[in-house]
Image (cartoon, helix red, strand yellow):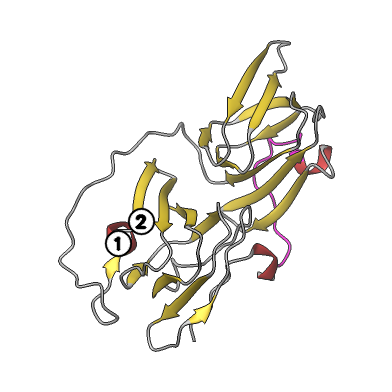
C-alpha cells in the first residue's frame, strides 16, 4: 500500500545526527522557542522559524537552504563582522541562501514565520538550472501518468543542483492529471483548501490543506502516482520542493 505523509508531525523518525561540524551555532539550540525541527533525515532538516514582534535571535549558522516566507518578513540581519542589512519579503515569497552565520531581528509589530529547508549535503555554491521544457506524450491516466513537472497544474519556478521547486495551483472544481513523483519532496502549503487525492487503484480520500503546514514524502525509494481534485471553494496553493539526489 502506498504510504504518504503530508504533515511532518505524522512522520515517525529516529534520532538524526547533524553531519556538519561547522554548525556549532545551531539555530535550534541557541534559539529555543523560535526554531523548531519539523522533519529531519540524512539529507535535509526542515525548520519552522517563528520570531515575535521586535524579537531578535541569537547569532546562529545555517548550511545552504531553501526558504518560504509564510508571513511577511521585515527584518534586519546582523553578521559576525558587525555589519548589518535590512531585508523584506512578502508572504509566500521563496528564497535561496548560501551558508551563513547571522542574527535576525524582526522589525515588525507582527510576528513572522518561515519554513526553511537546510541541505545537509550541499558542498558547493548553488548554480541555477534553467528548467527544460519537454512536451509529455503521456496521457495523464492511471496507466500512463505524466511526470510531475509536466503536469499542467505544476510549474517549475526554481531549480539548482540541490532542489527543484514547483508551484502547484488547483482552482476549485479542477482536477490534475495522474502524475508520478520520483523524488523525495517537501510540500509547503500556502492556503487552506478542501483537497481530495486518489492513488492508482484507490478511492478518493480527503486530504485537507492548511496554510503554513509542511510535510515530507519519500518518493525516491518509493515513486508514487496520484491525482488531486479541489473539492472546496478556495484555491489549493502549495510549493512542492523536490530534493535532488
Q: Is residue 199 visible?
A: yes
Q: Is 39 in front, or is 108? A: 108
Which percent across, then down, holds residue 52? 80, 36
Q: Is residue 71 left or right of residue 189?
A: right
Residues packed near mark 1 inside 10 Å, few (<14), some (14 to 19) or many (20 plus): many
Quickly name the residue at label 1: 151
Task: Give the answer, above or below, for where 24 lies relative to 156.
Answer: above
Which residue is painted at 70% across and 65% down in the image?
A: 9
Q: Is residue 12 left or right of residue 236?
A: right
Which residue is painted at 63% across and 34% down in the image?
A: 72
Which residue is painted at 34% across and 68% down in the image?
A: 176
Q: Is residue 188 left or right of residue 40?
A: left
Does the magenta segment cover residue 236? Answer: no
Which percent across, then down, holds residue 161? 39, 43
Considering the whole magenta stretch, tell me its main secondary structure: loop
Q: Are marks 1 and 2 in contact (CB under 8 Å)?
A: yes
Quadrant where the C terminus sits is bottom left
Task: Give the answer, above or below, for where 227 lies relative to 58.
Answer: below
Residue extent of the magenta highlight = 13-27
Which percent across, then down, holds residue 19? 65, 47
Q: Secondary structure at mark 1?
A: loop
Does the magenta segment cover residue 25? Answer: yes
Give the number of the disc on residue 154. Answer: 2
Give the number of the disc on residue 113. Answer: none
Which percent across, then down, holds residue 21? 69, 39
Task: Give the answer, above or below, for where 10 lies relative to 132.
Answer: below
Q: Is 159 in front, or is 213? A: 213
Q: Is residue 245 visible?
A: no
Amino acid at each position: 500500500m502506498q504510504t504518504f505523509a503530508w504533515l511532518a508531525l505524522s512522520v515517525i523518525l529516529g534520532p538524526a545526527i547533524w553531519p556538519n561540524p561547522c554548525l556549532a551555532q545551531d539555530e535550534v539550540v541557541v534559539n529555543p522557542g523560535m526554531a523548531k525541527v519539523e522533519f529531519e533525515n540524512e539529507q535535509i532538516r526542515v525548520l519552522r522559524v517563528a520570531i515575535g514582534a521586535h524579537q531578535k535571535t541569537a547569532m546562529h549558522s545555517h548550511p545552504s537552504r531553501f526558504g518560504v516566507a509564510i508571513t511577511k518578513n521585515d527584518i534586519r540581519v546582523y553578521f559576525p563582522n558587525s555589519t548589518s542589512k535590512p531585508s523584506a519579503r512578502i508572504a509566500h515569497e521563496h528564497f535561496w541562501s548560501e551558508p551563513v552565520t547571522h542574527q535576525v531581528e524582526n522589525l515588525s509589530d507582527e510576528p513572522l514565520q518561515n519554513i526553511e529547508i537546510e541541505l545537509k549535503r550541499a558542498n558547493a555554491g548553488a548554480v541555477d538550472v534553467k528548467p527544460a521544457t519537454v512536451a509529455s506524450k503521456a496521457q495523464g491516466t492511471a496507466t500512463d501518468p505524466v511526470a510531475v513537472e509536466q503536469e499542467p497544474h505544476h510549474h517549475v519556478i526554481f531549480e539548482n543542483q540541490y532542489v527543484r521547486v514547483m508551484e502547484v495551483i488547483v482552482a476549485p472544481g479542477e482536477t490534475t492529471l495522474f502524475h508520478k513523483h520520483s523524488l523525495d519532496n517537501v510540500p509547503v502549503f500556502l492556503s487552506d483548501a478542501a483537497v481530495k487525492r486518489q492513488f492508482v487503484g484507490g478511492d478518493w480520500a480527503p486530504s485537507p490543506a492548511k496554510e503554513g503546514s509542511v510535510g515530507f514524502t519519500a518518493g525516491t525509494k518509493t515513486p508514487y502516482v496520484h491525482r488531486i481534485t479541489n473539492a472546496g471553494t478556495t484555491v489549493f496553493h502549495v510549493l512542492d520542493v523536490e530534493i535532488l539526489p
